[in-house]
Image: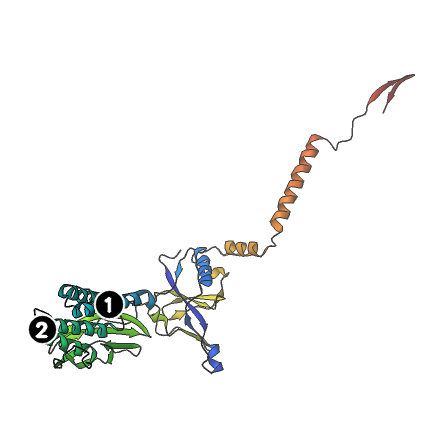
Amino acid sequence: MLDAPVPYVWLAPASSQGDPAETRVLRPGRAPDVEHARIREWAHARGAVLVRPLSLAATAPRPDPATADAIEVELGTARDALAALDVASLESALARAEQLLRDHPELPQAAWLRAEVERGWASRFTRAEPRDEARAARAWKRAAALDGGRVPGVGETALGSPDLVPVTFRFEAQPDIVVTIDGRVVKAGDQKLAEGEHQVLVRKRGRDIWASWVGVAKGAAVSLPDFSDAPCSEGDFADVRLGATGLDPGATRCSHWFVVRGGEAIAQCRGNACGAFMPFADPRLTKNGDANAANGRDAAARAPSWLPWAALGLGVVVTGTSLLLASGIFDKPARDTRFVAGGLKSE
């Protein structure tokens, strides 16, 4: 029995992309639910637990469109309150919108929405009492730092542009990693940004995997987390291939895993060394398994469905016959003696 759950890699035909040769290459994919259940049953019968690799989708931040809608509603409430010079309602709506954005940096439009919140504060301090021109200017500049600025709307006043300062962003450059700051793709190294908070969003293989608001100041060095694939994760198996030359495990760092070929056969791997593919019924993949018992189970599985009922019927017949024999019903009757005229007569 295996001591812990072990991941398996499901290999399926690759998209041809116009190249027929590509259809003969199997690449990692997600096992259909019915096949996943079959694989788990096969493993359970052999004292093991096989699981899908940890997926990026399981750990990635998931933006909820309803959250963005709620922020838009608060911004609309703030505009209406500003027109009515209802300061209490205006400030409450802006504060609620800002808190939602702080809690959800994974929203793709978070930087732009927060810029609109900042412009709402700028309008509040220029058009409603008590006024504060300095606070209004800071808010207007923060808005421009987040979305690059826009033409002032009706009732808005442009209050200057933000000053950019040097900032260093440190993260390991990887070909499948894309880092954006306020929606703009950046590379590791020196950047020019306005002081304040900025949205940092990281995508890997087309999926968002990390999001946060990051505060920066002049000369600051911002270090992002390590986004390398964890051993035995979905990304760790991304380079596994099965083609005409055999199975290529890639550069996986997983110490123990299985690979399933289209639901037909399975192979066991230790690090980058993999055994031969075997049918699911093969007992050699059973750790400490009993080959004879496995072969017996396989033979039972191949037996006709009517055989157990036929055997049961035969048992009933044999048992019934035995009881009849024991009762003597089939014995030859004993000779009888009858009295007749003229003496005794035996039959």
Nearer to the camera, 243 or 159 = 159
Q: Secondary structure at mark 2?
A: helix
Badge 1: few (under 14), some or many (20 or more) residues near its Cα, within 10 Å?
many
Q: Residue at x 30, y 74 (%)?
A: 204
The label on residue 191 is none
Nearer to the camera, 290 or 39:
39
Q: Position of residue 168 (x, y in %)?
A: 16, 79
Say which residue appears at 60% left-offset and 48% top-offset: 308
Q: Quadrant of the C terminus?
A: top right
Q: Return the disc, 2 or 1, that comes first in the chain's sequence.
A: 1
Q: Is residue 224 left or right of residue 54?
A: left
In this picture, residue 16 sits left or right of residue 55 = right
- Would you say residue 232 is visible in this rendering? no
Q: Quadrant of the N terminus?
A: bottom left
C-alpha span from label 2 to label 1 = 22 Å
Q: Amino acid at mark 1?
A: Ile
Count neighbours of disc 2 (C-alpha within 10 A) and say few if under 14, some if 14 to 19, many if 20 or more: some
Would you name the residue on which mark 2 appears? 135
Q: Residue at x 21, y 78 (%)?
A: 147
Q: Is residue 4 above or below residue 187?
A: above
Q: Which picture quadrant has residue 212?
A: bottom left
Where in the figure is residue 279, as x and y percent of width and height?
Answer: 50, 64
For residue 299, which quarter of the picture?
Answer: bottom right
Q: How is the image coloured?
A: rainbow
Residue 281 location, x and y as percent?
51, 60
Q: Position of residue 167 (x, y in %)?
A: 15, 79
Amino acid, disc 2: Arg
Query: Residue 71 — which label?
Result: 1
- Disc 2 to disc 1: CB gap under 8 Å: no
Quadrant assignment, res 226:
bottom left
Report the number of numbered marks: 2
